[in-house]
Amino acid sequence: MAVGRITGAWGIRGQLKVRSETDFPERFAPGSELHLNGAPAVVTSARPHRGGLVVGLSSVEDRSAAESLRGSLLTIREDQLAALPEGTYYHFQLIGMDVFTDEGEGLGRIAEILETPGNDVYIVRKEGGRDLLLPALKSVVLSVDVASARMRVRMTPGLR
């Protein structure tokens, strides 16, 4: 699970400019373990900078190493994810999920999720068909079964 993306190098001691991709800023607290290219890396320092972070990692010692990491993801293991409230899901749990109507009609798979101020919108793609935009509302999404990767929805007027 990605928690940040390296956007560049900072200074000469291997610090990294990072764009946070998590709602839990404590992921970057000194002493926290992240993964960089599959290998564990301990956060040695972190501070806010221009809408992002400047982060020091134990495994990055100089500017050359930091510059070579531009575009890399900082990740955590799935067992390190914070528990979410009932009925709330991480995007990675929904992407690729099969979507069916309450009458059993297959609509396709969730290909993308748009984040909007009011609610997320699921882009459901079916080969040979038009994409459907389904709002993530209780009146539309009837059930989500992460274990079987299935979502059941009610197609209200105007959604097709």
Image (cartoon, rainbow, N blue to C red):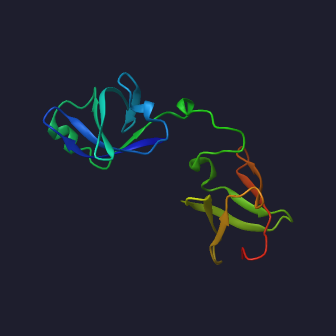
Please tell me in which quadrant of the rendered image residue 131 appears: bottom right
Residue 156 or residue 102, whichever sits in front: 156
- Please tell me whether residue 114 is drawn above or below residue 129 in the rendered image: above
The quarter in which the C terminus is drawn is bottom right
Left or right: 158 in relation to 110? right
Residue 144 or residue 149, whichever sits in front: 144
Left or right: 135 in relation to 65? right
Residue at figure coordinates x 64%, y 77% from the top left: 130
Left or right: 157 in relation to 125? right
Left or right: 159 in relation to 54? right
Residue at figure coordinates x 72%, y 39% from the top left: 86
Please tell me in which quadrant of the rendered image residue 28 appears: top left
Residue 66 rendering spot, x and y as whole percentages = 21, 40
Please identify the residue farthest to the right as the structure is shown: 103
- Please tell me whether residue 135 is drawn above or below residue 73 in the rendered image: below
Total marks in image: 0
Residue 4 rendering spot, x and y as whole percentages = 39, 43
Residue at figure coordinates x 27%, y 48% from the top left: 70
Residue at figure coordinates x 72%, y 73% from the top left: 159
Please identify the residue farthest to the left as the structure is shown: 12
Residue 20 rendering spot, x and y as whole percentages = 39, 43
Residue 112 rendering spot, x and y as whole percentages = 56, 61
